[in-house]
Amino acid sequence: MTVKGEMMVERIVQHLKLDGYCIIPEVIPYDKVGVIRDNLEATALEQGRLHGLDVKIAEQPPPHPIAGDPHTYGYGPTYGLLSVNQSFAPYLADERIVGTLKAFWGPYVRITWIKGELTTPGFQRGGWHADQPFNQKGTLRVFAPYGDAVIHLSSVWMFSDFTEENGGTLVVPGSHRASNNPTGGNGIDAMSPYPTEKQAIGKAGDVLLFDSRTWHAAGANTTDQPRLAIAVRYAPWWFNLDYLMPPDSPEKQRLAEEIGRPVEEISGGEATLTRDIFAALPAPVKPLLRHWVR
């Protein structure tokens, strides 16, 4: 559901409550997004790989990716993106997005996750899932059946036009009100189309904002160009972020000890920010990210 016109926060909140998702146009100005996209692509080239995953564009993809597997062919996650590239940082405190967060949770909100996503040509349709803490394949999660409460919001920032051909994100409207999702064995085939699914179609610079419970999946990229996006997630101040800390952090080590599981089995691994990087961020962005400073 794309909301146009005045884009008042009240309208965004309404769509999130009813549909579970909303497309907010031009969060990044259309005349500036191309420069940022080039900057982000340059970061990937400088690293020589997408952080933690070699991208193999030329190889033949398998028939089906594994639902929820971040190492599937052609889907390259860049965790902790802000620690190596801040070109998009000024827009993280967009008034419409932050106003929506505060409408749900009050004045104290945080960014929990920033990840680059490059979906290469040849990527086939991904599997239906909900984001943490509702993904039932996660070691740490809200166990299904879970209650009907908005405790986490996800977003996909489009740095390429999202089209049917390049696999713009698929969503199932209203699925955020279900008490389980296809990662929890709810009887829905995660790899099959769903009758009421919609595709997020938008321009580079638009943002898809959705309740983290909403069933969503990456679409198939049948073009000859990669689709570039950034995933950003948000939570209220009381949301526990220990599971997202780096593996060698005291918080992550303590958490692994408490639950009796290897630290490698705990999802997450967001990179922390240096004080210098944090100091250079725009003032409106800092309250969203202060918890990541080390």
Image: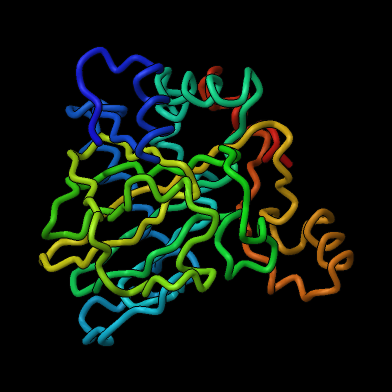
Q: Position of residue 129 (x, y in %)?
A: 44, 62
Q: Residue at x 69, y 62 (%)?
A: 140
Name the colouring of the figure: rainbow
Q: As rendered, which of 170 and 260 lies closer to the eye?
A: 170
Residue 212 is left or right of residue 236, and the answer is left
Quarter in which the N terminus is drawn: top left
Q: Is residue 236 above or below residue 249?
A: above
Q: Residue at x 62, y 61 (%)?
A: 144
Q: Position of residue 151 (x, y in %)?
A: 60, 39
Q: Residue at x 40, y 56 (%)?
A: 215
Q: Is residue 161 above or below residue 236?
A: below
Number of numbered discs: 0
Q: As rendered, which of 290 and 274 lies closer to the eye?
A: 290
Q: Position of residue 173 (x, y in %)?
A: 32, 46
Q: As rendered, which of 189 and 33 lies closer to the eye?
A: 189
Q: Residue at x 38, y 76 (%)?
A: 72
Quarter in which the C terminus is drawn: top right
Q: As rendered, which of 137 and 283 lies closer to the eye?
A: 137
Q: Position of residue 71 (x, y in %)?
A: 44, 75
Q: Is residue 264 above or below residue 47?
A: below
Image-quadrant location for residue 220: bottom left
Residue 43 is left or right of residue 104, and the answer is left
